[in-house]
Structure formats: C-alpha cells, structure tokens
Image (cartoon, rainbow, N blue to C red):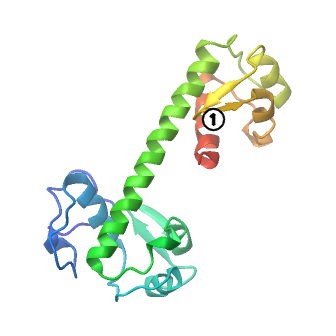
C-alpha cells in the first residue's frame, strides 16, 4: 500500500514497508502509524543524521518551500515551528518516526484540550449567562449582552469577559447568531489557545 498525503482515514494500515529507510518495525499501530506514514510520504527522502532544524529545513527544500500533509499545504517554516529544539539530532528514519509520532500525539492532545475548553466557554456563556441577543454589532454591545458574567474559566484560567471582548477583532462584528458567535469564538481560541 502506498500512503498518499491526505489519506489518513480509510486506508488499510501502514507497515514498515511503507516507510522507506525504516530499519526496525515501528512500535506504532493503526491510526498513529497511518498519521506518521502520511507525514513521511509528504517529505522527500531524508539523509541522517539531522543535527538541527536548519539541516532539516535545507533537506525539505529551504525557506519558502511548502509540503502537502494530509491535504493541508504548509510552509516548511510552519512545520519546523512545531518541532522542539530538543528533538535534534535525529539519528535515523526510526528516530524520525518516533519523534513525528510524539509531535502528532502532542497536537492531538492540544486539540482535545482546546475542544474541552471551548465546550466549557459555550456552557458558561450560553447556559449560565443571561443569554446573548443577536445581532451583536460591537464590542460594547457584546459586553452589555454578557451582563453579569464576571469571570469565565478557560483551561483552569479565570478570564474577565470584558477584557477578552476587547481582544476580538472589529472585523468579527456583527455577530449574527449563536452559531456565528460559536464559530468566531472557536476561531479565536484556535489562534490563542496554548
């Protein structure tokens, strides 16, 4: 089976034969192995060891190069921005696979935390708050709509809604419905959640 970028689901599974240069059978199974296989398929054949992000960037084509990973076109700079410096050196393809698996696991865990935080924010605002009245045309209007909500807890951090509202870009207004509010808050949280 040839793992194609963008084919995470619906494949019958990756194997050692799908990852060129792998010397030992990977410890990964199922979706984790498919995800790593997708990343490996998206990059050119690498020469090891890779002693730094700069060496990896050069082998990926240098600054300004893009890669297609699971249907997403990403700059090499963006991809390498996710790789901690302590991941280097990368000694072999086996080591590369292990480290890519760690990055994928970290990204999935972060996304799960973000989804939980988003669900909590929605619950605190929509269910426990006074109710938002749409359309919301400005930051001042949103602050008034939030009314007595003095704090919202997001990922164990207490946030003052009126301060958070001031960080919402003017281009987000008007907020036309509950669904529009949720979509825009989700987008903001994706950009700012760490």
Q: Between residues 156 and 62, which one lies in front from this camera angle?
A: 156
Residue positioned 30% across, 82% down in the render: 92
- Counting labels gives 1
Residue 125 locus on image (x, y percent): 64, 20
Residue positioned 30% across, 59% down in the render: 35
Location of mark 1 (residue): 185
Location of residue 5 (image quadrant) = bottom left
Residue positioned 48% across, 47% down in the render: 110
Secondary structure type for disc 1? helix
Side of 1 where 154 appears, left or right = right
Residue 186 locus on image (x, y percent): 58, 37
Residue 194 locus on image (x, y percent): 59, 48
Q: Check disc 1: other Cα within 10 Å, few if <14, some if 14-19, many if 20+.
A: some
Q: Is residue 29 above or below residue 115?
A: below
Q: Is residue 189 above or below residue 90?
A: above
Location of residue 70 (image quadrant) = bottom left
Instruction: Determine the residue located farthest toward the front in the rendered image.
Output: 86
Q: Between residues 26 and 121, which one lies in front from this camera angle?
A: 26
Residue 192 locus on image (x, y percent): 64, 47
Q: Is residue 184 above or below residue 119?
A: below
Q: Is residue 71 above or below residue 142?
A: below
């Amino acid at each position: 089976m040839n793992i194609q970028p963008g084919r995470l689901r619906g494949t019958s599974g990756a194997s050692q034969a799908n990852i060129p240069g792998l010397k030992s059978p990977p410890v990964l199974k199922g979706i984790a192995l498919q995800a790593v296989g997708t990343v490996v398929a998206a990059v050119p054949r690498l020469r090891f060891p890779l002693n730094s992000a700069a060496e990896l960037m050069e082998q990926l084509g240098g600054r300004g190069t893009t890669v297609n990973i699971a249907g997403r076109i990403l700059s090499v700079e963006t991809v390498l921005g996710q790789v901690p410096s302590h991941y280097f050196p990368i000694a072999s393809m086996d080591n590369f696979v292990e480290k890519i698996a760690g990055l994928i696991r970290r990204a999935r865990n972060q996304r799960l935390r973000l989804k939980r935080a988003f669900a909590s924010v929605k619950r605190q605002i929509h269910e426990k708050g006074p109710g938002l009245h749409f359309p919301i045309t400005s930051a001042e209007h949103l602050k008034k709509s939030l009314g007595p909500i003095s704090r919202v807890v997001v990922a164990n951090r207490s946030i003052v809604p009126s301060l958070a509202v001031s960080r919402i870009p003017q281009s987000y207004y008007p907020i036309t419905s509950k669904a529009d509010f949720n979509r825009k808050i989700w987008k903001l949280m994706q950009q700012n959640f760490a």
